[in-house]
Amino acid sequence: MQQIYTDILKAKASGQKLLAILLDPDKLKVDLVEELVAKIISSPATHIFVGGSIVENHKTELLVSEVKKYTTLPILLFPGDTNQITNAANGLLFLSLLSGRNPEFLIEQQIKAVPLLRNSSLEIIPTGYILINGGVKTAVQKVSKTIPIEQSNSLLIVNTALAGQYSGKQLIYLEAGSGAKTPVNNTLISSVANAITIPLIVGGGIRNKSQIKDAYDSGADMVVIGTAFEENHGFLKNIH
Ligand code: 1GP
């Protein structure tokens, strides 16, 4: 039973918007977790994502185990590579970097993950991951050695999202990259949202309440916030 995904579909069907807070095990000190999770659970956040482009071995498991002590919000791995897979989480965004042409992130990492996933209890959610130019060279671009799609190339982005849906992805993630200068623009979000029928996640460079609202109004089902919370632990107070 895909409980997390079923709940995402239900939220989409009822128009309830979702908010994921991204925690990067490489940047976050474990002794801050209790305090940060308290802020997350008193905010509108519905999901916690854990991951990063480069994370030292075992740091993910440590962080997830600590987060789990203080919340029952679903914890989804958002891994940059296979060493970030841990059974301590509830689910896994099984990402394919559809915007790129690097086989390592289209299929190789996914095959390498299989021995870790075959007997795991993680809910696996196939996710088409589309990197879009957010105005700065982000970690995803550097690590994946792929070129983001220009925001002006809306047709290619829509077709990439639909190719993801047709090949069985259950989510599409439009990513401007962590710390992006320019988030995915609203016209693009609505073009993709209008084309696909599966839920749409949008993240990268979203730093205030009005950008979150614009993304929702344009058709994003879930918004991801990483840097804004990482840089200002009071951030979530401002988005009620
Ligand atoms: C990155 O989409 C997420 O993968 C979040 O981006 O850190 O810019 O919020 P930010």
Image (spheres, rainbow, N blue to C red):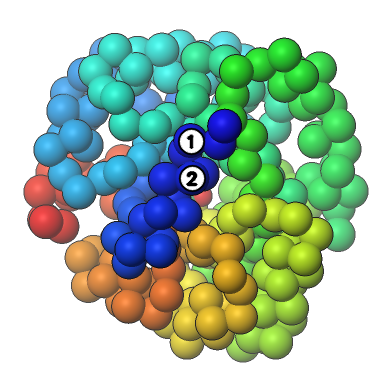
Residue 28 percent coordinates (x, y): 37, 26
Q: Which residue type does callout 2 highlight? A: Thr
Residue at horizontal 23%, vertical 64%?
208
Mark 1 and mark 2 residues within 8 Å of each other at the beta carbon: yes
Depth check: give the residue in front, 170 or 225: 170
Q: Which residue type does callout 1 highlight? A: Gln
Q: Which mark is residue 3?
A: 1
Residue at horizontal 47%, vertical 87%?
187
Residue 227 percent coordinates (x, y): 36, 48
Instruction: Tell me which corner region of the image, top left, top right, bottom left or bottom right, holds residue 56.
Output: top right
Where's the N terminus, which quadrant?
top right
Is residue 188 at least partly visible in the picture?
no
Q: Is residue 36 above or below residue 214?
A: above
- Give the class, few, some or many, for how many residues have Cα within 10 Å of label 1's Cα (few <14, many ≥20): few
Mark 1, ligand 1, within 8 Å: the answer is no
Left or right of 47: which side holds 62?
Answer: right
Residue at horizontal 80%, vertical 59%?
167
- Give the class, few, some or many, for how many residues have Cα within 10 Å of label 2's Cα (few <14, many ≥20): few
Residue at horizontal 81%, vertical 24%?
114
Q: Which mark is residue 26?
A: none
The residue under label 2 is 6
Residue 126 percent coordinates (x, y): 68, 46
Q: Give the number of marks.
A: 2
Residue 111 percent coordinates (x, y): 86, 32
Where's the C terminus, which quadrant?
bottom left
User: What kind of element bears circle 2?
Assistant: helix
